[in-house]
Image: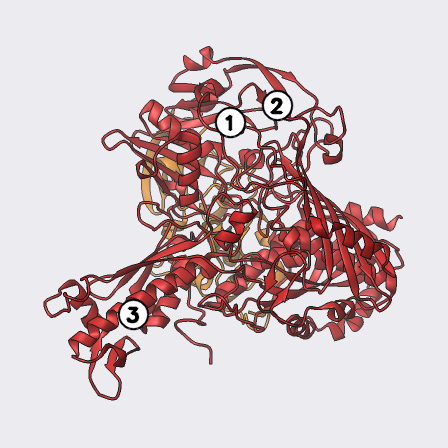
Amino acid sequence: MAKVAMKVNGKSVSREVEGRTLLVQFLREDLRLTGTHVGCDTSQCGACLVHVNGEAVKSCTMFAAEADGAEVTTIEAMANDDGSLNTVQQAFQDYHGLQCGFCTPGMVMSATALLKDNPKPSEREIREYLQGNICRCTGYHNIIKAIMAASGQDVASVAAE
Amino acid sequence: MPKDTGIGASSKRREDVRFLTGNGRYTDDINIYGQTYVHFLRSDVAHGRITSIDTSAAESMPGVVRVFTGKDFEGIGGLPCGWLVTDKHGQPMKEPAHPVLAQGKVRHVGDPIAAVVAESLAEARDAAEAIMVDIEELPAVVDMKKALESGASKVHDDLADNLCFDWGFVEENREAVDNAIANSAHVTTLELVNNRLVANPMEPRVAVGEYNRSDDMSTLHTTSQNPHVIRLLMGAFVLGIPEHKLRVVAPDVGGGFGTKIFHYAEEAFCTFASRQVQRPVKWTSTRSEAFMSDAQGRDHVTKIELGLDADNNFTALRCLTYANMGAYLSTFASCTPTWLHGTLLAGNYKTPLIYTNVKAVFTNTVPVDAYRGAGRPEATFQIERVIDKAARELGVDPIKLRRQNFITEFPYATPVAVEYDTGDYVATMDKLEEIADIAGFAARRAESEKNGKLRGLGVNCYIEACGIAPSKLVGQLGARAGLYDAATVRVNATGSISVMVGAHSHGQGHETAFPQVVAEMLGIPEDQIDIVHGDTSKIPFGMGTYGSRSLAVCGSAMVRATEKIINKAKKIAAHLMEASEADIELKNGQFTVAGTDKSVAWGDVTLAAYVPHNYPLEDIEPGLEETAFYDPSNFTYPSGAYCCELELDPETGKVTIERFSAADDFGNIINPMIVSGQVHGGIAQGIGQALLENCAYDPETGQLLSASYMDYAMPRADDVPFYAVDHSCQTPCTHNPLGVKGCGEAGAIGSPPAVINAVLDALNSGGHKVEHINMPATPSRVWAAMQG
Ligand code: FES
Ligand code: FES
């Protein structure tokens, strides 16, 4: 067991964890932040994606101990201060970019990271960026539209309903 | 003007808010005080005899609560199959035992042998490694035809061979079909494989069993599409727990696609073990476990023959299919290749004579059961591929050949025992030609060719049978359950409403769409109505969600219950306004007396029902709550036409989908936004089947070769295009109150043949005389086909 301390969603936390504890387990089981999901065991689905020091990270690929001292942001901290959906979240709702919602936290975190680096991504750029996020429900159509809309682009002109 | 509320409005989904903020409550998010964790030790060989299991070392490992093996389940029921198929000789299918933990033999990679319950998951895993199991390996049967050869290794020692059943449909038509094919001017024959798939909902399965000694109640939290079905199967057939002592809860479920219909060993185990260890027991599947324990889909090997007369009218269709059951019969395994497949072989066409023979085969592979579409994608793929091949052989336009043979008059009784109530296949094909801009294809092909690419266009139609199902009919066909559904509409004193439904939402948006219907009927805002689902202790006995049935069956029950509410509310309103009940009208949430200016609001009536001071107590009871069970009188028959346009790189064999269009007829539509989303997702799964996905076993050893996302190619965002979907062609269902048909499976049914037809069109346009290519049409397969 080792002690890890980090800032999660703006709050300082510290816990004793086993060396093999993954960051995603730490978030879900120790902190009960269950918005971050686990969809695979080979680091491919992206359901576990969070931000570590502002960068998109699959939290199943990192030990909790490796995040010692880091600032971690999860889906639970993404809404506006008044609790309303932020721009990306709102676009996902407006464009029906989710169905079962299981991939959704990872998608929102991924899309947010993309838009930080590339504020007006093209359809192709979004599709390529999302290679590491699998959604089985939506066929991606409305996810791509939601991300384009969140970046202020005219969605009606790029894709039908 | 599109509506902004009620039926036909694209109301935004209210469930999205919790999912978008990380507040969904999926089964793995449930943690119960004192819970233990179970890890299953699974077979790593496909077939073998267990000669010894020694758990003593594991039992003394730190944190271990108890280790279970098959011995602990002796005398406990096995997992049942919900559908009895009778073969062509009138014999029942073979139903081998399906134990919760292996008894004596393991029959597929992943078959659970032992289970360790421990204080933590890590301790359970560590201890499982200390279990000593000796397995005498037996030859594995993987290929279905080899499994049927005499002398083949037997999956189940107590059966004569590996044949589960040999089904003929319609057996009385067999000779007539043989004769018609023999006498046809042209016969097109095609042998094809419908590749095995893994449903892969993004949420892996989870089960948490909990036993409460104070009231002798067992609760199972599980990732299920149908909690009541699980309660019935597990309580009555496996564990012998009476239903009133068993509660099954399926909270937010992260996708199902069929694979979460079935009752699984892990569910029975957690429920059973929680009584044994007197503590909650939790199991969370890893994705690797999901690949070897979730029921898989498709896996048919088929020979199909289509007869045509000299004028290209279809004369007869004959189909011989080998359907893989895997090692055990999963809950609805037997129904998928038979009644959900054979009855759909007329497709959209007036083929007068049809016969199909299905041989269901046991192999040393993971059980196979319904996956999105279930039987109907297999039927559609055969029909639509053989028609395309016939068109190429005859040198006729594939769209024209289809149009010429369309069913145009409804109701239409097919030669395969179903009657289509409505449809307009000409209209959906017209719409498809428009949205896919088929007229502009030649120019786009010329452009591709300039760039050194081949371009192909493939079209297909589909019909499906949804709204499963008329109980009486399916009872005659072997179903061991009724397939009605139920809804309770509970109007509260202040006028808000809870609707308890038997359908289960795991992505379909019921929490939004169902209130739209009730809001429309009552004229009150949608946000005054909430849907309650997924908990057998809260909802009436309903059969859950699969087969695109939620709205057509459960939605109909909800309409009936709401009608009862309206009738009673009108009586109360009549009393309050001292008018005759016959004169009461309900509009926009106001009750009025026809021809007067008297009115009372919805809330006045609901309050009177619960505070019955001024109330006709001598005539009616207080309260305002009604339940309805709805049993459909027929299936519903959504249909449509799909088009795929793609580019093929002749250097590499890589296919890129450029355009995908879908024109569907779903009858009436409650929420067009949700319907489009369902079609998008189905199309992506269909494209996945056609180009990417394949569940592969080593043909000799039965080892699962595609056991993770490293080896099983899920469609990613850059594998698919934007889709053009249209559902403006609407021929309402004639036998349910909403006129709805269902839309959940269409995309997955309608898209694989369009993709493969387009691949073949591209290849042939480049002078490659390729007649068929099996799915998935990977670059290596396409490239090999081009080399001849
Ligand atoms: S759980 Fe981390 S990528 Fe799948
Ligand atoms: S919404 Fe279900 S997996 Fe993406």
Residue beneath the point at 54% across and 57% down: A138
Q: Mark 2 points at which residue?
A: B158
**Amino acid at dot 2:** Asp
Of the pair B669 and B673, the residue shown nearer to us:
B669
Decide: marks 2, 1 in contact (CB < 8 A)? no
Q: Distance between the residues labelled 3 and 2?
A: 58 Å
Q: Name the residue under label 3.
A: B566
Give the drawing colour for chain A: orange
Circle 1 chain: B
Decide: marks 1, 3 in contact (CB < 8 A)? no
Q: Position of residue B781 (x, y in %)?
A: 79, 46
Q: Mark 1 points at which residue?
A: B99
Q: Residues within 10 Å of mark 2 (few under 14, many from 20)?
A: few
In the image, the residue with mark 2 has its CB under 8 Å from the nearest atom of ligand 2? no
Give whichever of discs 1 and 3 has the lower sequence position. Answer: 1
Give whichever of discs 2 and 1 has the lower sequence position. Answer: 1
Q: Count numbered badges in the picture.
A: 3
Chain identifier, colour red: B
**Amino acid at dot 1:** Pro
**Residue B240 to residue B14: above or below:** above
Q: Where is residue B242 in the image (x, y as percent from the top left)?
A: 34, 35
**Amino acid at dot 3:** Ile
**Residue B338: in sight, yes or no?**
yes
